């Protein structure tokens, strides 16, 4: 980036800093109030927000239509359009998600562990909110509801910075969340949406270390890299979803066929969509041709290594870059591997530590795969599209963390808490 470009960005950051500082101060005050808010009040707000979502479906659809028209005019791309678009079914899903979060156990105040020392001190490790969470995301307007709901249920104040392409949709959904907060008598600043589209707001948010305790980015690699580079606060990251399905030599053919097709084609633009298929050499000739035929017949481009291309001349050559590409589209790379060891090695070399699945009837092979592959989510005989907080019973998620500290996998209410130690004595003094 040129010196002029850097100076321009810095100037714009300073222009929006007063606004972001006001949001930060309000969030800090709201977070202090939320830390002692009752479960009943939090649930009242969530249920009222769900009712508002349903009652204002028309307003949300109208707002989404404005976003979709702008996105289509700017050639946003099919995968991002799919993540952006809302219909009545998806809006109902947003409302149900709020209700499901309300049904979850409140993690705040949960005693994780407790013990008594020989000197009589009783020590407890107790869950508490993180404080104020800054959440930066792209495209998907439902994240506005999910992130707001999970933050509220876990006793955190949230500052939400949605993508500019979903600006109108997110504002309409956020308005429903605010009405829910009002219905429960909770601070309006408990869930705030950055009101401007300027990208400088991201830079300003990343510098609010006096008011924001943690940053959660959810988006493409460029966003994640910027957050890691600029954030003054700890980051719970959601990196590439370079997900694999491995068809082992003892896989049942029809099960493998169904799982691979679902993992790739159910929704190609989500982070849990399979991007690479690995198939054991021993069953490639029997298992792989019907899988390829299903995919190509459904409009999926298949890119394969030489053994795969010999099985179907419609398969195009895979390059080295294909093994590290998150397509988020109807494209799948396929490699025939020698055995389980080769599959584990491929995933370790090219994967993003997100989600991997093994299809096999061999329990010992499955156990090795689950133990030795280093990813946040590992599945046996199931589609990678289950990599979702809602499917895990968490009500919703802010993202899938691929890091190793604090949170890993779906980030739900428990992952948005930390803990403190509470010690009860009876007059003890230390010798």
Image: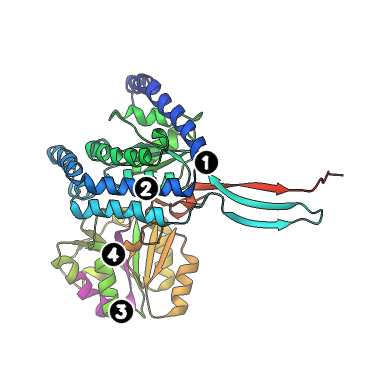
Dot 2 lies on which element?
helix
Compare residues 21 and 373 and report the one nearer the observer: 21
Q: Earlier in the sequence, mark 4 or mark 3?
A: 4
| Residue 35 numbered mark, or none | 1
Q: Earlier in the sequence, mark 1 or mark 4?
A: 1
Q: CA distance from mark 1 to mark 3?
A: 56 Å
Q: CA distance from mark 1 to mark 2?
A: 16 Å
- Residue picked out by circle 2: 46
Q: For the residues carrying marks 1 and 4, which lies nearer the camera in this image?
A: 1
Q: For the residues carrying marks 4 and 3, which lies nearer the camera in this image?
A: 4
Residue 99: % across, % down: 35, 54
Q: For the residues carrying marks 1 and 3, which lies nearer the camera in this image?
A: 1
Residue 258: % across, % down: 25, 73
- Residue picked out by circle 3: 283
Let me know if residue 281 is in the magenta part: yes
Q: Is residue 86 above or below residue 351?
A: above
Q: Earlier in the sequence, mark 3 or mark 2?
A: 2
Q: For the residues carrying marks 2 and 4, which lies nearer the camera in this image?
A: 2
Residue 93: % across, % down: 27, 55
Q: Residue at x 29, y 28 (%)?
A: 196
Q: CA distance from mark 4 to mark 3?
A: 20 Å
Residue span colored magenta:
271-293
Q: Earlier in the sequence, mark 1 or mark 2?
A: 1
Q: Earlier in the sequence, mark 1 or mark 3?
A: 1
Q: CA distance from mark 1 to mark 4?
A: 39 Å
């Amino acid at each position: 980036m040129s010196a002029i470009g850097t100076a321009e960005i810095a100037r714009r950051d300073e222009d929006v800093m007063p606004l972001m500082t006001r949001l930060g101060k309000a969030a800090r005050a709201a977070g202090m109030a939320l830390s002692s808010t009752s479960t009943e009040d939090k649930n009242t707000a969530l249920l009222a927000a769900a009712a508002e979502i349903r009652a204002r479906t028309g307003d949300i659809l109208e707002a989404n239509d404005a976003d979709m028209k702008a996105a289509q005019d700017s050639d946003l791309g099919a995968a991002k359009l799919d993540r952006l678009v809302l219909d009545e079914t998806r809006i109902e899903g947003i409302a149900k998600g709020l209700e499901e979060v309300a049904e979850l156990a409140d993690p705040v105040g949960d005693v994780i562990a407790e013990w008594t020392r020989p000197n009589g001190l009783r020590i407890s490790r107790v869950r508490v909110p993180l404080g104020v969470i800054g959440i930066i995301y792209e495209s998907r307007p439902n994240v506005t509801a999910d992130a707001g709901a999970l933050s509220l249920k876990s006793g955190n104040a949230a500052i939400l910075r949605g993508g500019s392409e979903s600006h109108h949709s997110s504002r309409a959904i956020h308005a429903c969340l605010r009405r829910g907060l009002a219905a429960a008598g909770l601070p309006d600043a408990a869930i705030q949406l950055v009101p401007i589209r300027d990208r400088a707001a991201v830079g300003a948010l990343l510098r609010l270390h006096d008011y924001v305790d943690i940053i959660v980015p959810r988006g493409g690699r460029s966003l994640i890299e910027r957050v890691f580079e600029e954030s003054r606060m700890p980051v719970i990251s959601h990196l590439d979803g370079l997900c694999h399905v491995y068809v082992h030599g003892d896989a049942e053919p029809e099960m493998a066929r169904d799982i691979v097709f679902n993992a790739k084609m159910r929704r190609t633009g989500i982070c849990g969509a399979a991007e690479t298929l690995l198939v054991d050499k021993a069953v490639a000739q029997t298992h792989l041709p019907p899988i390829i035929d299903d995919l190509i017949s459904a409009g999926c481009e298949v890119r394969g290594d030489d053994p795969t291309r010999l099985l179907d001349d419609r398969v195009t050559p895979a390059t080295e870059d294909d093994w590290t590409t998150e397509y988020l589209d109807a494209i799948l790379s396929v490699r025939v591997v020698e055995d389980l060891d080769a599959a584990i090695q491929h995933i370790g070399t090219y994967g993003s530590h997100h989600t991997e699945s093994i299809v096999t009837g061999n329990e010992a092979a499955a156990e090795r795969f689950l133990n030795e592959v280093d990813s946040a989510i590992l599945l046996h005989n199931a589609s990678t599209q289950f990599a979702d907080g809602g499917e895990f019973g968490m009500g919703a998620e802010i993202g899938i963390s691929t890091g190793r500290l604090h949170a890993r996998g779906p980030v739900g209410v428990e992952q948005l808490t930390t803990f403190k130690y509470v010690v009860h004595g009876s007059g003890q003094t230390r010798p």
